[in-house]
Amino acid sequence: MKASLYRKSVLVIVIIVASSLFLAFLGANHYYHQRLQPANDNKMTAITKKVGRFYQQLPIKQRQTYLQTIAKSGYQIAVIDRNGKTDFYGRQFRQKNFPGNKRQSIFAGQTYHGIRAFRKGILVTGFFDSDITDTIGVRLNRQQALLLRTDPNVQFGELRVYFTVLSVLAVILALVLLFIALRMLVRPILRLTKATEKIAAGDYQKPEIKVSSRDELGRLIVAFKKMTAALAQVEASRNQFVADVSHDLQSPLTALNGYAKELQQSDLPAATRAEYLQIIQQETERLSSLTKQLLLLASVSQEQVLTQKESIQVAEQLRQVIQTFLFQLDEKDLLVSTHLVEAIVLGNADLLFQVWQNLLTNAIRYAPVGSTISITQQVKAETLQVEISNQGAQIPPAIQAHLFDRFYRADQTRGTTHSGLGLAIAQEIVTIHGGQISVKSTPEVTSFCVSLPLKR
């Protein structure tokens, strides 16, 4: 049988309750022997001597009646002679054998303190033992001695039964309530376990676990639900990513296959053949570019922090990027306005260069012909901010929320020459550099802002 948290908890509680009761008995036993037993001995000594004196003052015919009356009031009494013959009054002693040496000491005039000298046990048994040696003994006359002790069955019988029943019921009720409480406590854990098993099997549906407490368990369940939602989103993104990759790979492959078959025709005109070869070359370049971007995205996504860093002059990188795109800028008659400052950051120069390339590519692609692209830098609170803006159409807020998603294209009608990975790659690179990237768009200007920590 598999050990469960519930069984373990029940076992621990039973052990704790049993140990507590045992330790409580030990403590009570120690208290009885150290405090109550001497006090009880002194009290019973005074009572026994008083009974003995009154016994001696009574006529012989009334003495037996007197002792019977005293016994009925809650005492066990024995009258013993020098030869050991004993008359009992009240409830019989369980142990009736009184040692001869102790009997002789009483007739020698000594008071017998059997209660104080009674043997010590693990539990508090001395007070309730019906043993003739657990008595107080005094000499009545030359031939008789009186042994007397409290009869707990008479004085405390009903009370003892009451407290015994009360204690047993209290323990049983406490255990039952504890078991119920444990089951209520373990129930959400069992549901959490089942939900975890479902997630391990690939089922990312929201777990139906009610949270009614704000303790550690409640916070754990809330955190688990958030984790499940995040995993479901990751799984959905992964599936979408696979679907997008498959689509973007399938499109050029299908085109390549189709045009390759057409080229096999022997009667194909030379001009058409040249056109098909050009299309094949374009699709091959597109496929190569997509593969490189996928490899780059996979590479930067796996890195949490940069292991190797170098000092990078960002202004110099931006000048190089502008030089790289002079042909595209001239094609659309675009003007580049710059405001650069000399600032150094730590990171991977090749990766950051990729960020500026991606952002400037988008700025050129969506800038109106004959407009201006602005590239500015400024330092704020130990942070370098790089802003690349164009005068293109405003990006709606609904689209802004998805701009950094993989394979997302803001407008499919603008063409499919780009993969939709550029901004996702840029965001990954900026993140591993400890920075942030954001977008803001108005009817007049659309800007992408990159913030990077300065070198200290």
Image (tube, grey):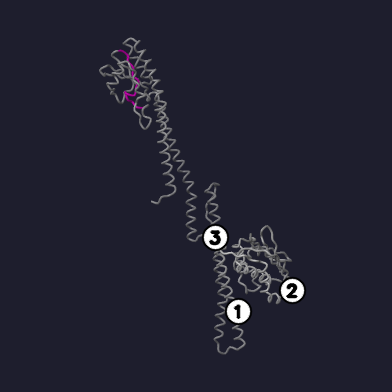
440 sits to left or right of 11: right
Q: Looking at the picture, does residue 329 appear above or below residue 168? A: below
- Report which residue position mark 1 lands on: 282
Tell me the CA gap for discs 1 and 3. 37 Å
Task: Indicate left or right for 6 with 259 as reference.
Answer: left
Q: Which mark is residue 370?
A: 2
Q: Decide which of tag 1 and tag 3 comes sooner along the chain.
A: 3
Which comes sooner in the sequence, label 2 or label 3? 3
Tell me the amino acid under the disc marked 2.
Gly
Tell me residue 339's x, y (percent): 72, 66
Where is residue 21? Give x, y as percent. Answer: 41, 36
Residue type at mark 3? Ala
Q: Which is closer to the viewer, label 1 or label 3?
A: 1
Assess whether mark 2 and mark 1 are in contact (beta carbons under 8 angstroms).
no
Identify the image quadrant of the C terminus.
bottom right
Q: Alpha carbon of mark 2 to alpha carbon of mark 3: how far?
A: 46 Å
Q: Which residue is mark 3?
A: 232
- In front: 75, or 104? 104
In the image, which residues are magenta? 128-141
Magenta segment main secondary structure: loop
Q: Is residue 137 magenta?
A: yes
Q: CA distance from mark 1 to mark 2?
A: 27 Å
